[in-house]
Image (cartoon, rainbow, N blue to C red):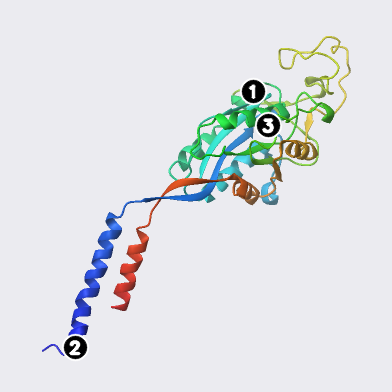
C-alpha cells in the first residue's frame, strides 16, 4: 500500500524524468559561437646572439640562464594560462627584418604545436649577423596588418628584445616611426640584466667557442660617418686601423633605449623580471580582440539535472 500523497508520487517520477531529459540535452547540445574579447597576439622574439648572454634570473633564480631561455620559459608558462579562444603566433627578428612564422591560432587546441615551435626558436635560425632593433620593430609594425586574422583589428604585438643594437647606433640616429606609430597596438618586453656581461659565441651546432671580443664587433656608431657595407661584419674603408675600444662586445638590457622606441612607436613597455610579467603582458587590454569563439554550454543543463536530483 502506497501511503505517499499523489502529488509526491508524481514528483518522484517527474523529477528523475526531467533530470534525464536535461542530461540527454547536455549530451546533444552543440557548441554555440559567442563573441568574446580575448588576446589575439603576434609574439616577436629577438633571436640574435646577444640573447645568449647568461644574465637572466627569472623570479630571482640562483643560477643565471640565457635571455632567450628566460623568454621561452616565461612564454611557455604564459601560454598555458591564456584563456581558450585566445589566438597566438610566433615571429622572430634579426638584422632589421621581422618574419611572422604563421597566422595566429587558437591556444587550447594548438598548445602543443605552439610549445614545440617555440622550443625550436634560437640563434641558429638567424639570417643576419647584425641586430637593428629599431628597423626590426618598424618591420614588425609594417608586416602585422598583412598577417591573416579573424578580427577587424590588426593583431596585437609583443616585441621581446634586450635592446642590444649591433653594430652600435646612437640615439640620435635611431629609426623613426612616423609612418607606423599608433597603427599597431602592443608592448615591448625588455629582457636582460643591468650589468655589462660577455656575449657567448657558438657555432651552428651549439658548440661553445668562447666570448665575443672587442675587436670582433664595431665599437661605435658609424652610420653618420661612412656608408655601411653590404656584408654584415665586413670592415669599412678606413676602419681597419681603428683601435677597438669600447664595450659593444659586452651586453646588458638597454632599457632606456627600448623605452624611447616604445614611446616613439606608441607602444607600452614592460621588463621581464618574473614569469608573471610575461603573462601580464599577454593579458594587456589593448591586445584583446572581439572574436567568435565556440563555447561549450553543456554544463548548464548538466548542473540543472544535478540540482533536480539533489532536491528530489
Q: Judge depth for marks 1 and 2 and give the one in front.
A: 2
* Image quarter of residue 22: bottom left
How far from the left and from the top, in percent, is residue 222?
83, 19
Contact? badges 1 and 3 (CB < 8 Å): no
How far from the left and from the top, in percent, is residue 282?
60, 46
Decide: is 215 above or below 192: above
Tell whether 248 sits left or right of 10.
right
How far from the left and from the top, in percent, is residue 164?
75, 31
Quarter of the N terminus within the rendering = bottom left
Q: Provide the residue designation for mark 1.
A: 203
Q: Judge depth for marks 1 and 3 and give the one in front.
A: 3
Is tag 1's residue or tag 2's residue first in the polypeptide sequence?
A: 2
Task: Give the spatial CA distance, label 1 vs label 3.
Answer: 36 Å
- The structure residue drawn at horizontal position 28% and vertical position 78%, both measured from the top left corner, is 312
Q: Which mark is residue 180?
A: 3
Task: Give the spatial CA distance, label 1 vs label 2.
Answer: 87 Å
How many C-alpha atoms fall within 10 Å of the one at disc 1: few (<14), some, or many (≥20)?
Answer: few
Q: Judge depth for marks 3 and 2 and give the one in front.
A: 3
Please tell me which residue lies in front, 201 or 71: 71
Q: Provide the residue designation for mark 2.
A: 5
Q: Which type of secondary structure does the marked residue at label 1 adopt?
A: loop
Amino acid at each position: 500500500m502506497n501511503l505517499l500523497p499523489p502529488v509526491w508520487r508524481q514528483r518522484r517520477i517527474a523529477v528523475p524524468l526531467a533530470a534525464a531529459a536535461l542530461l540527454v540535452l547536455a549530451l546533444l547540445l552543440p557548441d554555440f559561437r559567442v563573441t568574446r574579447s580575448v588576446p589575439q597576439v603576434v609574439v616577436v622574439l629577438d633571436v640574435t646572439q646577444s640573447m645568449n648572454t647568461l644574465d637572466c634570473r627569472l623570479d630571482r633564480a640562483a643560477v643565471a640562464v640565457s635571455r632567450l631561455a628566460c623568454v621561452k620559459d616565461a612564454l611557455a608558462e604564459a601560454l598555458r594560462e591564456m584563456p581558450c579562444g585566445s589566438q597566438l603566433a610566433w615571429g622572430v627578428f634579426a638584422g632589421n627584418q621581422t618574419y611572422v612564422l604563421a597566422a595566429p591560432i587558437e591556444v587550447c587546441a594548438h598548445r602543443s604545436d605552439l610549445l614545440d615551435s617555440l622550443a625550436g626558436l634560437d640563434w641558429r635560425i638567424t639570417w643576419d649577423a647584425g641586430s637593428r632593433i629599431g628597423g626590426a620593430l618598424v618591420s614588425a609594425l609594417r608586416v602585422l596588418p598583412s598577417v591573416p586574422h579573424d578580427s577587424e583589428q590588426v593583431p596585437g604585438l609583443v616585441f621581446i628584445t634586450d635592446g642590444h643594437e649591433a653594430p652600435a647606433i646612437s640615439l640620435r640616429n635611431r629609426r623613426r616611426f612616423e609612418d607606423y606609430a599608433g597603427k599597431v597596438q602592443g608592448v615591448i618586453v625588455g629582457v636582460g640584466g643591468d650589468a655589462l656581461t660577455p656575449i657567448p659565441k657558438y657555432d651552428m651546432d651549439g658548440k661553445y667557442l668562447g666570448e665575443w671580443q672587442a675587436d670582433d664587433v664595431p665599437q661605435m656608431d658609424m652610420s653618420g660617418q661612412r656608408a655601411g657595407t653590404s656584408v654584415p661584419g665586413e670592415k669599412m674603408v678606413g676602419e681597419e686601423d681603428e683601435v677597438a675600444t669600447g664595450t659593444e662586445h659586452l651586453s646588458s638590457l638597454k632599457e632606456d633605449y627600448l623605452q624611447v622606441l616604445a614611446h616613439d612607436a606608441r607602444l607600452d613597455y614592460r621588463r621581464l623580471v618574473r614569469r608573471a610579467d610575461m603573462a601580464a603582458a599577454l593579458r594587456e587590454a589593448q591586445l584583446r580582440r572581439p572574436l567568435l569563439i565556440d563555447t561549450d554550454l553543456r554544463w548548464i543543463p548538466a548542473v540543472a539535472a544535478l540540482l533536480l536530483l539533489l532536491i528530489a
